[in-house]
Image (spheres, rainbow, N blue to C red):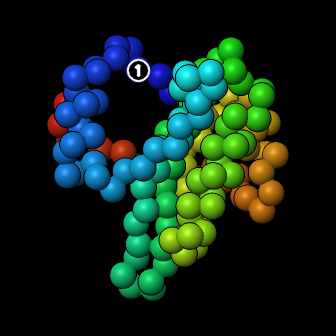
Amino acid sequence: MTADILDEKGIRLRIDDPFYQKTYSILAVLDGMVVGRIEYHFYGCIQDGSKMAYVDWIYVLPKRRHQGIAQGLFKQFEKECLSFGINQYYLIRAENENANRFYSAFSDVSLTEEPLLRKQLSAT
């Protein structure tokens, strides 16, 4: 997942926006440069008390891939989940060959083909 343009001003505004205050990021930094990021948020189901996390974004710079960076980001993310009593996490995954190989290496996961409903309510 990439963006066509970098909206630095918008990103800086969203960091202080209360709506986004429950969104967390873990950064992978090498030699003073961010080379990877995982972004997520926690949520829960009042009905059954389950606590979940959704991974909004996982990205590693192309020249830094296959170096264990994404695995390290997920490892730290899972530690955060455990510290908050999260029962399970979800993400919408890419289905290309590299992504399938990456996600297939996870232990104790299921990779399924589930239908997704998405409705655009307004332009972003």
Task: Work out whether residue 89 or residue 68 is closer to the camera in this orientation and state it.
Answer: 68
Quarter placement of the C terminus: top left
Q: Nearer the viewer, residue 114 or 83?
A: 83
- Tell me if residue 104 can be seen: yes
**Res. 97 visible in picture:** no
Residue in the picture at 43% in, 62% down: 42
93 w.r.t. 76: above or below: above
Q: How many marks?
A: 1
Question: Where residue 16 sits: x, y (%)?
Answer: 21, 43
What residue sits 30% from the left and 44% below the top? 119
Q: Outermost residue toward the bottom? A: 48
For the point 25% across and 31% down, the residue is 12
**Is 72 left, or right, of 124 in this rendering?**
right
Residue 62, above or below 110: above
Q: In this view, which residue lies farthest toward the front?
A: 32
Q: How far across and how far down the image is residue 14, in percent?
A: 24, 38
Decide: few, some or many residues near mark 1? Use Cα within 10 Å; few <14, some 14-19, many ≥20. few
Q: Position of residue 2 (x, y in %)?
A: 47, 22
Residue for badge 1: 3
The three-letter amino acid code for the residue at tag 1 is: Ala
| Element marked by disc 1 | loop
Q: Position of residue 56 (x, y in %)?
A: 46, 44
The answer to which image quadrant residue 8 occupies is top left
- Say which residue appears at 28% left-offset and 52% top-offset: 21
Q: Is residue 85 left or right of residue 104?
A: left
